Amino acid sequence: MNLRKKYEIPNDTVITIAGTVGVGKSTMTNALANALDFRTSFEKVDTNPYLDKFYNDFERWSFHLQIYFLAERFKEQKRIFEYGGGFVQDRSIYEDTGIFAKMHYEKGTMNKVDYETYTSLFEAMVLTPYFPHPDLLIYIEGSLDDILERIQVRGRPMEQQTPIEYWKEMHARYEDWINHFNACPVLRLNINDYDLVNNEDSIEPIVERIASFLHQTRKLRVKV
């Protein structure tokens, strides 16, 4: 059965998945898209011309990388809404400025002028009534220990070589970011409340929560 129809989720809905490395954003994106008969939107890493340069010289390329991400995510968001919605999106445009660009500035790998230029451009492009914000942002969360365990299990070489202190910092930054986020409605999901890898049926309670949340937020908008 199509769970979108069962729970009366509009076919033009746009859902964005957010969360730190290791929480299962891609798994959730695919599972939700399959359950709702929606399209997926994933970050295009292979065509990014700045990634290799950036990893070799953070200070030289951090600004360029963030501007590239901003432009690509903005175009993708525009494409999704021009298509008429019906998408699940892996990672949001909001994380770039709220977490990554801010981290580069605070750590000194992006200077003040570049950071202010970037944030000014982001605000002009995204923080306006004209920008097509998602109907819902799903924030996947979990304890630091649970996330570190998942990173170990999936065994990606680059992640295995990354110091634990980095993951601690990212976990803290994500928690701080989501606690202040208000650009669109947020539904929090804890990674211990479902198991999409071993139990495909665990997606249905999530869809039910999404439907209830969307219906409630739309009622509130009508009242306002």
Image (cartoon, rainbow, N blue to C red):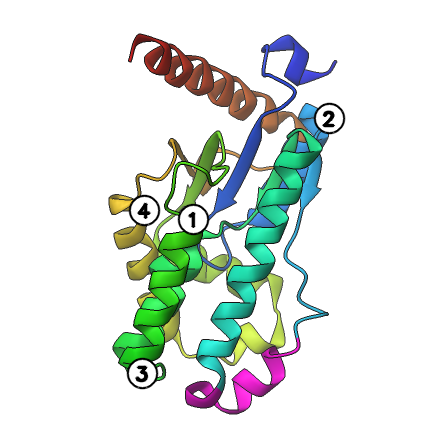
- Looking at the rendered structure, the kind of residue marked 3 is Asn
Q: Nearer the viewer, mark 4 or mark 3?
A: 3
Residue 186 highlighted magenta (yes or no): no
Q: Is 134 drawn above or below residue 4 in the view shown?
A: below
Q: Position of residue 89 (x, y in %)?
A: 59, 43
Spatial distance from mark 2 to mark 4, Cα to Cα? 28 Å
Determine the residue positioned at 30% across, 44% down: 181
Spatial distance from mark 1 to mark 2, Cα to Cα? 28 Å
Would you name the residue on which mark 4 appears?
178
- Mark 1 nearby-residue class (10 Å; few <14, some 14–19, many ≥20): some
Spatial distance from mark 3 to mark 2, Cα to Cα? 44 Å
Q: Position of residue 28 (x, y in %)?
A: 59, 40
Q: Is residue 199 at all visible to an observer of this figure?
A: no
Mark 4 or mark 3: whose residue is earlier in sequence: 3
In this rendering, the count of numbered labels is: 4
Would you name the residue on which mark 2 appears?
37
Mark 3 or mark 1: whose residue is earlier in sequence: 3
Would you name the residue on which mark 3 appears?
111
Q: Quadrant of residue 137?
A: top left
Determine the residue positioned at 69% across, 41% down: 40
Mark 4 or mark 1: whose residue is earlier in sequence: 1
Q: Nearer the viewer, mark 1 or mark 2?
A: 1
Q: Is residue 74 at all visible to an observer of this figure?
A: yes
Mark 2 or mark 4: whose residue is earlier in sequence: 2
In the image shown, does 78 or 30 lie closer to the viewer? 78
Q: Main secondary structure of the magenta part?
A: helix
